[in-house]
Amino acid sequence: MSSQDKMLAFLDAFSVDAPVWSAEELAARFELPLSTCYRYLKSLHQAGLLARVGSGSYVVGPRVLALDRISRLSDPVYSIGSPVVAALSKRTGFSALLSVLYSDSVMCVQQVATEDAPAGLFGRGQQRPLVAGATANIILAHLPPHQLRSVFGKQKDSIAAARLGHDWDTLRAKLAEIRQQGYAFSAGEYRAGIAGLAAPLFNKDGEVLGSIALATSTKSERLAEFKALAPAVMKAAAAISAGIAESSNVVDLPARALG
């Protein structure tokens, strides 16, 4: 790992649960000399990616807000998908999510939550494993074999726990069924109490980029109605994919980075 990679890895330490870090804590976490840690922090601070707080510790810096604004305005998945997600939620009365494939995980880029949205619903900027739940499973089902093998090798136990299969052949067979039906349904697989219904998003070359999903409580009185909305979700996904293919923005990229 290069020095630049090690420095940028500092950003991975910051989260909602751990938003403040001191130089000493970061040095211990990444097993680096304190002098090196200070040098990295100085560069990240000067770039605006980190900001100092009164205790001499650091938090995420204001540059991130500027980058988020650029992302919202230029990312075709977000700009094209957001109005479709909002319309789908309004039309069905269920919460809706827009997510992308990102480095062995799924990241939410847009959430439209209804008043009765289940607790713990996926929100913008949150990441979750690329295993379990409709939002992830529909992406898994459309990964090319070499990427899927990479995921299987790294997350074999999680895949088994999600009941997707204890071996490669079983996993491929189950994902083929999902791919053939065009959508994925889940009930409490990733987070207890949440049901999901998702369809895939593609770039202009037909490579999977992410998914659009509806979500509700597994105890909802409208669960049967929810399950019957698969055609509406697939239609919304097709509309977003068509818009991405026609966009002049960065749409010729392959599916988002899978490390």
Image: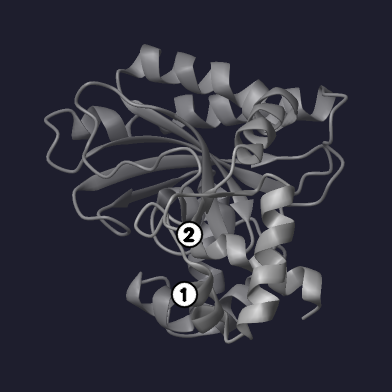
Q: Disc 1, disc 2: CB below 8 Å?
A: yes
Residue 14 badge: none
Q: What coloring was used for the rendering?
A: one colour
Q: Nearer the viewer, residue 59 or 136?
A: 59
Mark 1, residues whose alpha carbon is within 10 Å: few (<14), some, or many (≥20)?
some
Figure check: 41 above or below 69: below
* CA–CA distance in space, label 1 to label 2: 9 Å
* Front-lying residue, 127 or 8: 8
Identity of the residue drawn at 70% across and 23% down? 73
Q: Is residue 139 above or below residue 124?
A: below
Instruction: Point out residue 197 in the picture as x, y percentages from the top left corner.
Output: 39, 40
The local crowd at label 2, few if under 14, some if 14 to 19, many if 20 or more residues have their Cα within 10 Å, is some
Give whichever of discs 1 and 2 has the lower sequence position: 1
Quarter holding residue 169? bottom right
* Residue at screen point 56% across, 25% down: 235
Q: Residue at x 34, y 57 (%)?
A: 17
Of the two numbered discs 1 and 2 in the rendering, the one whose residue sits closer to the viewer: 2
Q: Residue 25, labelled with which disc?
A: 1
Q: Position of residue 60 (x, y in %)?
A: 54, 48
Q: Amino acid at mark 2?
A: Ser
Q: Say if residue 7 shows up in the picture.
A: yes
- Label 1 sits on a secondary structure element that is helix
Front-most of residues 28 and 122:
28
> Quarter-wise, where is residue 191 in the image?
bottom left
Q: Which quadrant is home to the N terminus?
A: bottom right
Residue 57 has which mark? 2
Looking at the picture, which amino acid does disc 1 mark?
Answer: Glu
Give the residue drawn at x 81%, y 51%.
254
- 105, above or below 168, in the image: above
Q: Is residue 165 left or right of residue 238?
A: left
